[in-house]
Amino acid sequence: MTGEIISKRIDIPALQLKPLALKDAWLWKPEDEYWGEPDDPLNRYFEPIINFGARISYEMEQIIPFQDPENFDSDPILEASEYHDCGDYKEAYKIIQKITIADLRCLDAHAHLGAWEFNSTDAPYENVIDKAKRHYEVGVKIAELSLDKEFNGVLPWGRINNRPFLRCLHGYGLCLWRLGDPVESRKIFNRMLWLNPTDNQGVRFLLADIDAGKTWYERGSD
């Protein structure tokens, strides 16, 4: 088959995947959290969340094919990461490919694929960052199959199975910012703050940089 690709899209609902379950609902209350020192200027990002009040907290189902639940050392994601860290990229990608073929809903696989691309260069190579964005976006959209339009619950980082989704969101937001779209990136980071108000990933600092007009390449600078 030959021809020219004229368009592409990510249409996860078309795959008819079974949504990841949201488990163990309990009431999350902002008064139970520590919100930092009162004079911290970044507290402004938490104020709407605190004022909104209590919400329901969930833990998202995590799928990791080939993991032995009786053996914590049998983690194929960790194995792939170790190969990648040692420079054996072919074996790392081979393991991740096997995982995603077995079950595309393994969000941590998409998060790692995105991170490998994103961190492969500090240069503004749009094709590389766009590829990273697609990996993260697939993970985000698979997770979103579990969230209806009215979802206003909490998916805290402390409930560890939420972390793959939060990593995908984080990477997706960074890609948008790095590709020159701070408006959409800000929406992602703000959403992350509502999903995980304790902000273990530090998105309040990213929001402050974006609000200060900084590009991704100027982040964290004075």
Image (spheres, helix red, strand yellow):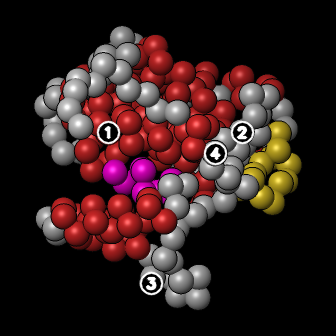
Can you say whether 67 is above or below 59 in the image? below
State the residue position of label 1: 132
Which residue sits at x=36%, y=34%?
133
Is residue 73 located in the magenta-colored stretch of the structure? no
Give the class, few, some or many, for how many residues have Cα within 10 Å of label 2's Cα (few <14, many ≥20): some
Amino acid on which disc 2 is placed: Leu
Q: Quadrant of the C terminus?
A: top left
Amino acid on which disc 1 is placed: Ala
Sequence-wise, the earlier of marks 1 and 3 is 3
Of residues 69 and 93, the one nearer the viewer is 93
State the residue position of label 3: 73
Q: Quadrant of residue 4?
A: top left
- The magenta segment: 106-113
State the residue position of label 2: 147
Q: For marks 4 and 2, give the one nearer the viewer.
A: 4
Q: Which mark is residue 192?
A: none
For the residues labelled 1 and 3, say whether their Cβ atoms are less than 8 Å apart. no
Which residue sits at x=45%, y=23%?
185
For the residues labelled 4 and 1, say whether their Cβ atoms are less than 8 Å apart. no
Q: For marks 3 and 2, give the one nearer the viewer.
A: 2
**Helix, strand or loop status at disc 3:** loop
Amino acid on which disc 3 is placed: Asp
Number of marks present in the image shown:
4
